[in-house]
Amino acid sequence: MSPSTITALSPLDGRYANKLVALRNIMSEHGYMHRRVQVEVVWFIALSDAGLAEFKPLTTGARAYLLGLVKNFSEADAAAIKEIEKTTNHDVKAVEYWIKSKFEARPELQKAAEFLHFACTSEDINNTSHALQLRSGRDQVVLPGLDRIMLKLREMAHAFADLPMLSRTHGQTASPTTVGKEMANVLVRLQTACERIAAVRIMGKMNGAVGNYNAHLSAWPEFDWEAFSKKIVETPEPLGLGLTFQPYSTQIEPHDYMAELFDAVARANTILIDLARDIWGYVSLGYFRQRLKAGEVGSSTMPHKVNPIDFENAEGNLGLANALLRHLSEKLPISRWQRDLSDSTVLRNMGVALGHAALAHGALLTGLNKLEIDTQALAADLDASWEVLAEPIQTAMRRFGVPHAYEKLKAITRGQSVTAQTLHGLIAALDIPQAEKDRLLALTPASYLGKAAELARRV
């Protein structure tokens, strides 16, 4: 059976394939090969400019041709490398041989061919390629996806800043808030999480088989290979890699920055799981309706249903993403002695972890964009919950020294059906200034909002 979306083992490449095109271009094996070609070409060009007598600077035409191999790298090129790998049984060597095949009919490049992959171990190419992939995945897919969610949350926070909503702590009625304030709470948390994702320094090393420049110095002992490597790693693209230089490593880059990045993404995802579950609950309570889509079915047997499937999809995929991200962050920084291969197969799943996250972020945004407020449901819930005013009444009583204020309110509210009349009768009998009585008598569950509206508008 030939591969297709319907025969794909992973739903990321099957059912959800069309939702992850941007990430697939970056984190797939094709994307990995593309970055390997980029690193090999950058190293080769930089060597020609290093002042080594045996490798003169490349001509402008040769440089343009080499950079064109990177810029125009195609799926056909990746397939050609895979064909070479059938013989080499080594993926990095296959990349090297493919690039050398592009030197044919170009005497200048053929003459210098042995400087391709010069003194490099495979991990010099792999770790920098992974770094380039992760930087692009973070900057082009993950953070923009989270930014779109934050934009929607800010829009909702401002639009519903003044709209009263009954709170629930421990699942029980509690001091009212506003819909906008609850969106603002999530927004502020997510902003902090995104700042931490963006702040992670993406690192790369190019220092040889065990991190000591052994091979480099055996060829040119007087040359400052560490400074040369640092320059390549940190010089902006296209003539460098634009990463942060990792000066100390074994054969592999320690992967600590990866763990930091994956943990940071997982933290953002956890915040979104919290949001997805809360919105699911508000839909269940009737606070939100979901905009209908023509032809869509909510249940195979119950025609009335409009299920909160986007939030459920988001919650499930966020959980999958975090399970993978946390395994990556716990496993990758551990390697036996100077190198073992257990990280290699795990690293190939970075795109799977980020794929589930990106899928979830998209589903959550879709769900948020479908929501419509049911103001009548919100108002009815508040009007049925006068017991929440026990808090402000007993607090005002305490201010004026009324003894046993808390206990008096507890006696008439805890576990009982409370009406406005019940509370107003208590207030009328209080020995407190009339102005304070009037203020308490004017209070309703819908007006007892504290600074909720102000806080919602501030974000």
Image (cartoon, rainbow, N blue to C red):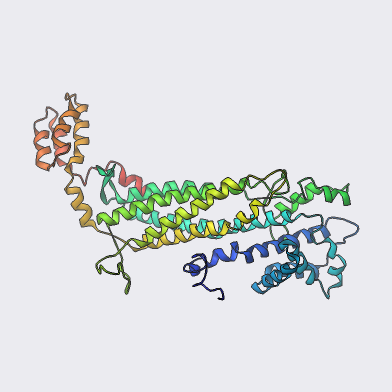
Number of marks drawn: 0
Which residue in the rendered view is the most extreme toward the front?
Answer: 1
453 and 87: which is toward the camera: 87
Tell me residue 87's x, y (percent).
75, 68
Name the quadrant containing residue 67: bottom right
| Residue in view at x 38 percent, y 46 percent | 185
* One can see residue 303 in this view: yes
247 and 199: which is toward the camera: 247
| Residue in view at x 68 percent, y 52 percent | 341
- Horizontal side of 156 relative to 393 (left or right) equals right
Tell me residue 307's x, y (percent).
31, 62
Name the quadrant containing residue 131: bottom right
Tell me residue 50's x, y (percent).
83, 55
- Residue 383, above or below 72: above
332 and 166: which is toward the camera: 332
| Residue in view at x 68 percent, y 54 percent | 127
- Horizontal side of 105 relative to 188 (left or right) equals right
Name the quadrant containing residue 113: bottom right
Which residue in the rendered view is the most extreme toward the right?
Answer: 53
Tell me residue 39's x, y (percent).
72, 60
- Horizontal side of 336 relative to 325 (left or right) equals right
The quarter in which the N terminus is drawn is bottom right
* One can see residue 176 in this view: no
